[in-house]
């Protein structure tokens, strides 16, 4: 039987890629949120142990805030297809246009204390946030699995709070700006 993708191998490869992408994104969102919940901030040195903490904010708000600060898709790229102007600058068809969501999510015109981890801001997001919050891209090229990733991450975070005897030790302190924005490397430490 032939499929639209060409063969059963093509289907298997496509599903493997989809599962891998969803799992990578969900694990990064979970890791960023768990780190931020425990007090990690840029500059936290290697060797620091982040203890378990009691969280009160809903997991969905914590996920949204972690993605605001540390979007997985931190740099978006599109090819210019027409010749419009952007801010008075003419764009040339075929050129690449880049949008840094990492910076966009820190726009002080929209976000109060833009560098602070404040999940409570998602109870009433600020006016204009939709144009300044796109952790999975936008338009037709946006991640189709974003809702699943957010819900899965929130569900895992709700379960994670039961592990009140697991601390996180920072192994490599800085985030990694690659094709995805990866969190610092940590190791779990049992505290009891």
Image: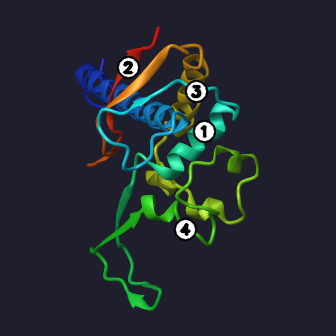
Where disc 2 sits, the SS reads: strand
Whichever of callouts 1 and 2 sits on the residue coming sooner in the sequence is 1
Where disc 1 sits, the SS reads: helix
Q: Position of residue 103 (x, y in %)?
A: 45, 64
Tag nearer the camera, 1 or 3: 3
- The numbered disc on residue 188 is 2
Tag nearer the camera, 2 or 4: 2
* Colour scheme shown: rainbow
Name the residue carrying label 3: 53
Compute the Cα span from label 1 to label 4: 19 Å
Q: Residues within 10 Å of mark 3 (few under 14, many from 20)?
A: some
In which image quadrant can residue 81 be found?
Answer: bottom left
Compute the Cα span from label 4 to label 3: 29 Å
Name the residue carrying label 1: 62
Whichever of callouts 1 and 4 sits on the residue coming sooner in the sequence is 1
- The numbered disc on residue 107 is 4
Q: In terms of depth relative to the viewer, which is nearer, 33 or 113?
A: 113
Q: Position of residue 156 (x, y in %)?
A: 54, 21
Task: State the residue at coordinates (35%, 73%).
Answer: 80
Callouts 1 and 4 close, C-beta under 8 Å:
no
What residue occupies the far bottom of the structure in this picture? 88
Task: State the residue at coordinates (59%, 13%).
Answer: 162
Compute the Cα span from label 1 to label 2: 20 Å
């Amino acid at each position: 039987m032939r499929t639209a993708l060409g063969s059963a191998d093509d289907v298997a490869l496509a599903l493997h890629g989809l599962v891998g992408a969803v799992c990578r994104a969900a694990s990064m969102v979970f890791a960023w949120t768990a780190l931020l919940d425990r007090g990690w901030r840029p500059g936290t040195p290697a060797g620091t142990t982040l203890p378990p903490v009691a969280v009160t904010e809903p997991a969905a708000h914590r996920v949204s805030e972690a993605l605001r600060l540390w979007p997985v898709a931190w740099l978006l790229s599109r090819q210019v297809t027409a010749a419009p102007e952007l801010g008075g600058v003419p764009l040339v068809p075929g050129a690449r246009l880049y949008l840094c969501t990492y910076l966009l999510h820190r726009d002080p015109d929209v976000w109060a204390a833009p560098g602070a981890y404040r999940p409570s801001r998602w109870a009433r997001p600020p006016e204009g946030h939709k144009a300044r919050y796109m952790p999975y891209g936008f338009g037709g090229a946006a991640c189709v699995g974003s809702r699943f990733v957010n819900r899965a991450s929130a569900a895992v975070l709700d379960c994670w709070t039961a592990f009140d005897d697991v601390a996180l030790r920072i192994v490599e302190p800085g985030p990694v700006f690659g094709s995805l924005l990866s969190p610092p490397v940590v190791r779990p430490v049992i505290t009891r």
